[in-house]
Amino acid sequence: MTARLQLAGVSKAYPGVVANDDISLSVAGGEIHAILGENGAGKSTLMKIIYGVTTPDAGEIRYDGKLLEAHSPGQSRALGIEMVYQHFSLFETVSVAENVALCLEGRLDLPALRLRIRETAARYGLAVDPDRIVMDLSMGERQQLEILRCLMRDPRLLILDEPTSVLSPQAVEQLFTVLRRIAAEGCSIIYISHKLDEVRALCHAATVLRGGRVTGEVDPRQATSHELAVMMVGSDLPIPERPASTPSATPRLSLRGLSGRPLGLAGRRLQDISLDLFGGEVVGIAGISGNGQSELAACLSGEALCPAGQVLLGETPVGQMRPDARRRAGLAYVPEERLGRGAVPGQSLTANTVLTGYASGLVRHGMVRFAEARRRASAVIERFSVKADGPGALASSLSGGNLQKFILGRELALAPDVLVVAQPTWGVDVGAAAFIRQRLIDLSRDGAAVLVFSEELDELIEICDRIHVLSEGQLSEAVPREEATKDRLGALMTGGELGPVAEPAE
C-alpha cells in the first residue's frame, strides 16, 4: 500500500543551527503518527516543511506516492493537508463563524455556514458556538475552533501541534474520539505532543527526534512513558524535590467575595470567590477550561478590574489597580497565551525583558538600561537552558516550549512576592516541564506565594501544597495535597461537593 506521506533525507539549516538533519519517515493512510522530541528538536520546522511554510534545503517529500516539490500552504490545503498550529491563528474581534469562513472557498452565506458549523461540531462532539466572539473564548475553546476549521475542509492529512495543551481531561477524551473517528475514515494524522500517556493511548507509531535527527522509531502502545521520555531526552528525568512548606504568618494574596463578570457578558460569572495565599506555598487552581479561570486570572493580573469584592496584596487593596501598579506591589504574572500576551512576537528577548522588568531597575528616569536588560535576558537564557540565538533573538523565533521557559525565567528574575502562572508547562517537553515545576517549588520555598492555574491534574498534585477547583465560576474548598486524587478533583471539576451557591445580584 502506498504511504500517505513519505519523507526522505529532509534537511533544513538556519544560521547557527541545523533544525532538521537527514530526516526520513513514513505515515500510512489512516495512521495516527506521533512526532516526539524536546523543545527545539526540530519538530515544528519539520511540520512547516510538510505544510509548505518552509522550503527544505535537501530531501524529498512524497504525498500519496507523488513527489511534492516546492509548495505553499494554499497548495497543501488543496491537496487535503491541514495543520493546527500550537499558537493559534484566529482573528479575535470577529465571530467563530467568520473565522471559519476565512478558510473556506466559495460565496459567503453566514446563516448556512452557522448551521453547517453546528452540524459538524455536533457530529464530532465539539463545543463550538458559531455566534461567539473569539476574544471571549477560553484557550481550550479556541483549540476546538482551530480543529473544527480543519475538519470543515475534509482533510486527508491532519497535522496537530500540541492539540491537548489547554484541554481538560474530559475534552482530551472527546478529542481522541474525534481523531480516532477521522482516522478510521482514512485521514492520516501527525500528532505532536509532550504528553506521553496520551501518545501511548492514541498513536499507532512514533518517530523520535533529538537535535534535529531521527533517533528512534517505536510503537508507543508497546512502550512505557518513561521509556519514551528517555528516548526523547537521552537520560533519566530528575525527580522533583519538595522541601516541607513553612507558610508565612499572614497572607501574601487575599481574595474576598470576588464576584461578577470581569470580562463582560460573554464571560463566565465569578461567584463569591475567597482565598488566602501564603508565602512558602504553592496553591493550585484546577478546572475544566471555560469555568472562570481566565476571568479569575484577569482579576488577579489587573487585565480586568474586579466587579465586586476585593483583591489584596498583603494589606493593600489592588482590585482597581492597573497591571503596572500591581507589579510594583510585588505581583508577577505568566499568562497562558505566550505570544501576544506573555511576549511580543516581533520584539527581541531583551525588549521583552524590559516589558515586565521596568520596575526592577531596567528603566530609570524614563531611560531604558538596555545593557542591563541584555545581561538579564542572557542570564535567563543560560539559567533556563533556553534554545535561542542570544538575547537579540525575536520571541517569535523560539519554539513554544523555549519561549515558555524564557517568560517564566524573566518573571522569576524579578523575585516576586506573589507569582500567578497559568498553564506553566503548556507545550513544554518532559525534561523542561520537570525543570519548570522544580523552579516553582523553589520559588515558594524561598518565601514567595505561588498560584498555579493548570488543567494538568498530575502536575498540580505533584507540585502543590493544596488545590482548589473552579467550577462554573465557583471555587471549591482546598484539597490538601496528601488527599488530592484525580478522581476527587475530577468530581469537583464536574460540580460535585461544591455546595449551595447564592445567586449574586447583577
Image (cartoon, rainbow, N blue to C red):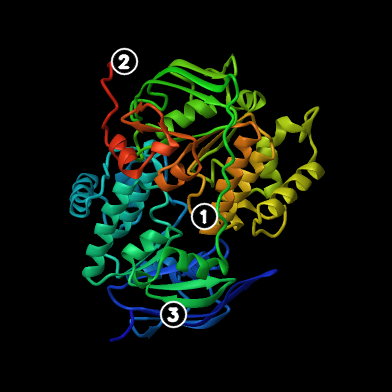
Location of mark 1 (residue): 428
Which of 491/326 is in front? Answer: 491
Residue 266: x and y in percent read 33, 30
Does the rendering let one see residue 429? no
Which of 355/501 is in front? Answer: 501
Question: Residue at 61% of width from left, 45% of height from top?
Answer: 439
Does the rendering let one see residue 446? yes
- Residue flagged by tag 2: what amino acid is it? Pro
CA–CA distance in space, label 1 to label 2: 39 Å
Location of mark 2 (residue): 504
Question: Residue at 57% of width from left, 72% of height from top?
Answer: 212
Question: Residue at 28% of width from left, 86% of height from top?
Answer: 1
**Element type at mark 3:** strand
- Mark 1 or 3: the one toward you: 1
CA–CA distance in space, label 1 to label 3: 23 Å
Q: How crowded is mark 1: few (under 14 residues within 10 Å), some or many (20 or more)?
A: many
Q: If you read the primary sequence from the N terminus, does the residue marked by circle 1 or circle 2 appear first?
A: 1
Location of mark 3 (residue): 25
Q: Is residue 182 above or below residue 411?
A: below
Q: Which mark is on residue 135?
A: none
The picture quadrant where one finds residue 431 is bottom right
Residue 405: x and y in percent read 60, 50
- Residue flagged by tag 1: what amino acid is it? Val
- Residue flagged by tag 3: what amino acid is it? Leu
Q: Is residue 266 above or below residue 388?
A: above
The picture quadrant where one finds residue 443 is top right
Q: How crowded is mark 3: few (under 14 residues within 10 Å), some or many (20 or more)?
A: some
Q: If you read the primary sequence from the N terminus, does the residue marked by circle 1 or circle 3 appear first?
A: 3
Report how many numbered discs are placed on residues in the image: 3
